[in-house]
Image (cartoon, rainbow, N blue to C red):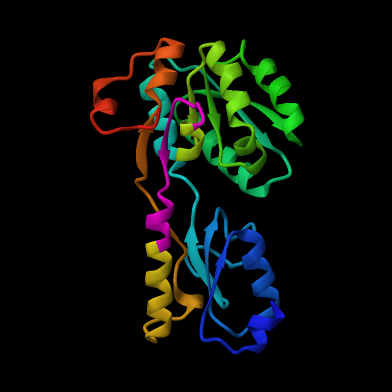
């Protein structure tokens, strides 16, 4: 961090929350554009998404959680309860679960949580939820992501449809996602950096950006394994990540 700060660069790109936090504390007067950061506010990188106020801005990889919840309701028409498993010490995961609860509350759907602190807790957490929920939602969470194949086996055997935060989890056995596209996020980040270098704007006045639509992906092998028929409206738009 100090090496960058001392080099007096015109711009710093920082990938993921820890890197951005390290840069923000050492390079206070160099513009910093962060990417692959779920929540800039809770990471204390900006005052607000709308008006960052300091020398940091960027692109959030927060998934389109409202769209992900809509996908759950389309896949499970009589949805009453959604389970979610996440690592309670990951602030980014807690933020996503809060948004899920907001979306569920509006639809009159109950959310049942199971928190884990390491990969070793995941099978037990899945087992504790499987008889209580109609479907499962998994946020982009580092602990969960590393154990998706194990987790997917438990919930798929129990015939529970699982919507996940991003594409990699679907490739590893979850049913579906409306996933952020990291290539697109990279392009958005680059555009913000270019505007700063061109003198068009400064981080303090550049709202944090998010990808609002996302890419619809489905694992058809999982759909067959759990005996679910994917509605045509979803199939026609989705990419198959079996």
Does residue 177 show up magenta in the picture? yes
Identify the image quadrant of the C terminus. Answer: top left
Residue 123 x/y as whole percent: 70, 22
Q: Residue 103 appears at what percent x and percent y?
A: 47, 35
Residue lying at 40% horizontally and 55% vertically, measured from the top left: 183
Residue at 36% of width from left, 83% of height from top?
200
Give residue 99's position: percent from left, percent from top. 53, 41
- The range drawn in magenta is 172-186
Residue 140 placement: quadrant: top right
Q: Position of residue 23 (x, y in %)?
A: 65, 73
From this view, report whether residue 149 is shown above or below residue 35. above
The relative height of residue 230 versus residue 187 in the rendered view (above or below) is above
Tell whether 227 sits left or right of 18. left
Residue 50 against residue 120 in the figure, above or below: below
Query: Going 63% across and 37% down the picture, which residue do you hit?
Result: 146
Count of marks, rendered view? 0
Taking depth in this image into account, of 155 and 146 the one nearest to the observer is 146
Nearest the eye: 69 or 177: 177
Q: Is residue 175 left or right of residue 146?
A: left
What residue do we see at 37% from left, 22% from top?
Answer: 220
Residue 233 lies in quadrant:
top left
Question: Between residues 6 and 86, which one lies in front from this camera angle?
Answer: 6
Image quadrant for the N terminus?
Answer: bottom right
Res 72 visible:
yes
- Answer with left or right where residue 136 lies relative to residue 18: left
């Amino acid at each position: 961090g100090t090496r960058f700060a001392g080099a007096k660069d015109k711009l710093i790109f920082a990938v993921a929350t820890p890197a951005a936090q390290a840069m923000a504390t050492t390079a206070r007067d160099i513009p910093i554009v962060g990417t692959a950061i779920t929540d800039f506010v809770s990471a204390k990188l900006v005052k607000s998404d709308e008006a960052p106020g300091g020398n940091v801005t960027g692109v959030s990889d927060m998934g389109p959680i409202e769209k992900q919840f809509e996908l759950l309701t389309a896949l499970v028409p009589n949805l009453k309860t959604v389970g979610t498993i996440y690592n309670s010490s990951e602030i980014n995961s807690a933020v996503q679960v809060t948004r899920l609860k907001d979306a569920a509350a509006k639809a009159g759907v109950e959310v049942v949580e199971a928190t884990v602190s390491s990969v070793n807790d995941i099978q037990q957490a899945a087992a504790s939820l499987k008889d209580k929920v109609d479907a499962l939602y998994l946020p982009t969470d580092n602990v969960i992501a590393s154990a998706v194949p194990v987790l997917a086996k438990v919930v798929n055997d129990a015939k529970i449809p699982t919507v996940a935060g991003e594409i990699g989890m679907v490739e590893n056995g979850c049913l579906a996602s409306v996933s952020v596209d990291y290539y697109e996020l990279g392009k958005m980040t680059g555009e913000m950096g270019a505007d700063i270098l061109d003198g068009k704007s400064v981080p303090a006045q550049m709202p944090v950006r998010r990808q609002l639509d996302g890419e619809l992906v489905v694992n058809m092998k999982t759909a067959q394994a759990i005996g679910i028929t994917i509605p045509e409206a979803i199939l026609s738009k989705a990419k198959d990540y079996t």
